[in-house]
Image (spheres, rainbow, N blue to C red):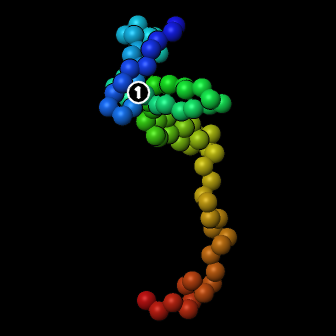
Amino acid sequence: MKVNLIPIGNSKGVRIPSSVIKECGFGDEIEMRVEHGVVVLAPARRIRDGWDGAFARMAAVKDDPPLVPDMMEHDWDEEEWEW
């Protein structure tokens, strides 16, 4: 589909037909990037979208080990501190 650039202040814009917006699943915001000289538009995603499900799957298969193992504890942690 060939479209014309339209002036919007000091910028240019493109009118996207409603049928294309619906087909692409665009909401009020979209992501835009340039790849190899081509403008790519995609539906905007929430930054951490899907993290909750990913963490739940990790926990279900016990794939969430501590970042710092317990063996890192030292005797001086208990003996030399004054409480």
Tell me if I can see residue 10 in this picture.
Answer: yes
Compare residues 47 and 12 and report the one nearer the observer: 12
Query: Which quadrant holds residue 36?
Result: top right
Q: Which residue is mark 1?
A: 12
Label 1 packing within 10 angstroms: few (<14), some (14-19), many (20+) = few
Amino acid marked by disc 1: Lys
Question: Where 17 sits versus 30, above or below?
Answer: above
Query: Which quadrant holds residue 10?
Result: top left
For mark 1, give the secondary structure.
Answer: strand
Residue 46, image x, y percentages: 43, 36
Tell me if I can see residue 25 in this picture.
Answer: no
Residue 30, image x, y percentages: 43, 28
Question: Where 24 sits versus 19, above or below?
Answer: below
Query: Which quadrant holds residue 70?
Result: bottom right
Residue 73, image x, y percentages: 62, 75
Who's the residue at 62% across and 53% down the image?
65
Compare residues 69 and 8 and report the one nearer the observer: 8
Q: How many marks?
A: 1
Looking at the figure, which quarter contains the C terminus?
bottom left
Compare residues 10 and 51 and report the one nearer the observer: 10
Residue 12, image x, y percentages: 41, 27
Question: Where 68 sits versus 40, above or below?
Answer: below
Who's the residue at 55% across and 26% down the image?
39
Compare residues 39 and 51 and report the one nearer the observer: 39
Who's the residue at 62% across and 29% down the image?
37
Who's the residue at 49% across and 31% down the image?
32
